[in-house]
Image (spheres, rainbow, N blue to C red):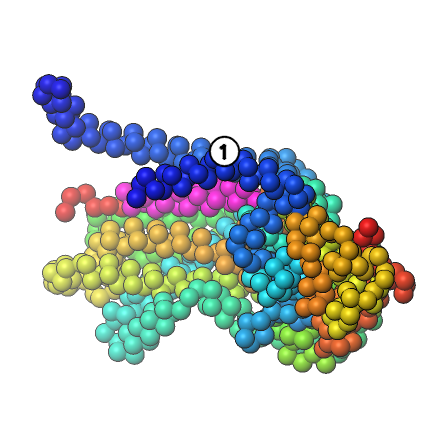
Amino acid sequence: MSSIDVMRPGRLLHDGRVRGWLAQAGIALGVVGLVWFFVDNAGENLARSGVATGFDFMGARSGVDIDFKLIQYGPDSSYGRLLLVGIANTLFVSFFGILLATVLGFAVGIGRLSGNWLLAGFSTIYVEAVRNVPLLLFVLLWYYLVIRGLPAPRQSIDLAGMGFVNNRGIFLPSPTDPSPFQAVIVALAVGVAATWLLRRWARSRQDATGQPFPTVLAGVGLVAGLPLAAALVAATMTAWNWPALSRFGVRGGTTVIPEFLALLAALGTYTAAFIAEIVRGGILSVTRGQREAAAALGLNRRQILRLVVLPQAMRVIIPPLTSQYVNLIKNSSYAAVIAYPEIVSVFVGSALNNTGRAVEIIAITLAIYLAINVSVSLLMNWYDARTRMVGR
Amino acid sequence: MMTKLAAVALAALATAPIAAEAQTASPGAKSATLAAVKARGHLECGVHTGIPGWSFPNDKGEWSGLDVDLCRSVAAAIFGDAGKVKYTPTTVQQRWSVLSSGQVDLLSRISTLTFKRDTELGFNFVQINYFEGQTFIVRKAANIKEAKDLDGAAICVAAGSTEERNATDWFRERNLKINIVKFEKNDDAIAAYDSERCDTYTAGTGALAGQRRKLKNPADHVILAGTISRDPQGPVTREGDDGWDNIIRWVFNGTLIAELHGVTSANVDKMRAESRNAEVRMLLGADGNAGQILGLPKEWMFNAIKQVGNYGEQFERSVGMGSDLKLERGFNQLWTKGGLMFSPVLD
């Protein structure tokens, strides 16, 4: 064996780029091979054990009912439709959960750094108490708190003639014809656009005259007020289906089930504790000099927080915040233990048991969680890139 | 070291075909599951996570109940020791994957025989060891007399159970409205019912009798008379091992045959020595080679009956009048006494 023959591949291997490519190619091959092995193995085993396979079941009649649905669905609907009900319910509880967790998390995170001893103390206790309890227990705790805390149907709380609250849920009137409410979405869009314009105008005016304008307050008024006004107008245009007490609970109207309330409370308050720590860390990462400089400019405490500290803290906050949002969406699958009908409960629960298509159903469910969470990550990264300071 | 290993491996390879040939001499030994169970030294049995009377662990972790007795009978038939069973508690949702993945050899947990499960899911329901129907448990104070009165009620069920679909279909057919509230486990569902989240919880009559004992005040609840479905339940195996199916089927049939001929755990020694009934003599291994044909010891059913009892004994002890559940034999009485339990002939 001559030394030159050995040298050549040896020298190539010392090249970092070549080595990188080789490693990448090796890993890619390994992953493809592994996936192929699992798919092939599963297929062979399923065929041998006589288990039916394929996605044809998606069109079959499901035969199961769902008591909380945002889209049209009944026992005659297909498994595909059942999946959509599950996805909609997962997104629904995740959206409000993220909203609650963000608001609460920022409040508690800022509260922990407050000079107010009582507020800081409460915030610390909250974070430490909630963060160290397993989420499953927390979900069950909230569930039993909610259903035991609310009265039985016979002792329903009357919402001033507008509906009822009892341990079967919150019962509200529902419109017999929901089409006028499409105006609410239009009003929301108008409100957002108006706020954007207002902000531009306020900025240019402040640049020109130095006069500040309460953009935030006006924006909240526009974004919330316009849709509210549209909803009120729409409400007068449609007939209502009023809930009425019956032998068991309440009939008619629309229902917010206690499982939703419990899951929302559990996910929101649990994730808020983690977000609070992320926010605290973010704020602490902004150097003291920034505050002092801002104070020297004559900004008050609130202005310092909003205009100087938080924008810089967001750089640090957003990446871990994204993982908390993703976690919350995944954790919504704890719903299965308390009967909130989201993807895992209806699809992996009812559909898998009735069809036995374990591999297909688990694969679909994984793909859906992946799609939702990748979308959330991309959205957050886009926001992060947009708001990132240019230079430093 | 390596050479030693290689020699052993070679020897194993060389003798493997011979061993396989030798096995075919006894038809029962065709069962791969039986071979695996024997090699392992115990039976892996999938049971319910816990319903008194059916499969329930006591505070020492010892399982008992009618479904557990079937596992014990099979273990006694294979090993001569009813204690050689390991139990895997399974929920409504886990049970099928636990069985099809090979984690258990046998699933014995009040599972209803349905067309899909028997065909598409790749399982065999080898025999029915309990006939019943589905009914409801309600609070006495609610003053409900029959299922129809539940119009508008909230019903707690386990997601994916036959109860879920049965209830949905039954009320729809009668144009009655119900709210299905579905949980991952039966235990979560009954706990929610106990917390008044639901007006009723539904299950087979036998399971309900067991579940009722878990409520805070069992006396405050009634089980509605009459049923809305038929629920034939029995042990389930994976498709593709006929030899193993034969073992489970005939061990269960053996407990029925024993009851029919009055063979009990108390008199089984005497019966083996003295009985002149051909079926009893074959069952207990006094004549013939029934055990051997199944790949089991000659005393397969002798051991099972002696240690676990015949079907009637098992029933009375676990769910019948001798138990806390106090269920009537009803459909589960032998056909000679007006029930549905009818064993094929051991001949």
- A383 or B130: which is nearer to us? B130
Circle 1 sits in a helix, a strand or a loop, which is it? helix
Give, as a single range, the part of the protein colored magenta: A358-386
Q: Vertically, is A114 above or below A355?
A: below
Q: On the rendered structure, is B152 left or right of A57?
A: right
> Residue at 36% across / 45% down in the picture?
A377
How packed is label 1: few (under 14 Cα within 10 Å), some, or many (20 or more)?
few
* Residue B182 appears in the rendering: no
* Residue A383 appears in the rendering: yes
Q: Let me know if residue B275 is in the magenta part.
A: no
The residue pinned by badge 1 equals A40
Q: Vertically, is B87 above or below A90?
A: below
> Residue at 30% across / 31% down in the picture?
A26
Our reading of the magenta stretch's main secondary structure is helix
Classify residue A9 by image quadrant: top left
Circle 1 chain:
A
- B71 or B154: which is nearer to us? B71
Q: Total of numbered circles in the picture? A: 1
> Residue at 58% across / 57% down in the picture?
B43
Q: Position of residue A288 (x, y in %)?
A: 13, 62
Q: Let me know if residue A363 is in the magenta part.
A: yes
Classify residue B235 by image quadrant: bottom right
Name the amino acid, label 1.
Asp
Q: Position of residue B298 (x, y in %)?
A: 69, 56
Q: Position of residue B136 (x, y in %)?
A: 75, 66
- A234 or B201: which is nearer to us? B201
Classify residue B89 by image quadrant: bottom right
Q: On the rendered structure, is A125 left or right of B260?
A: left
> Residue at 73% across / 51% down in the picture?
B289
Q: Vertically, is A136 above or below A72?
A: below
- A252 or B156: which is nearer to us? B156
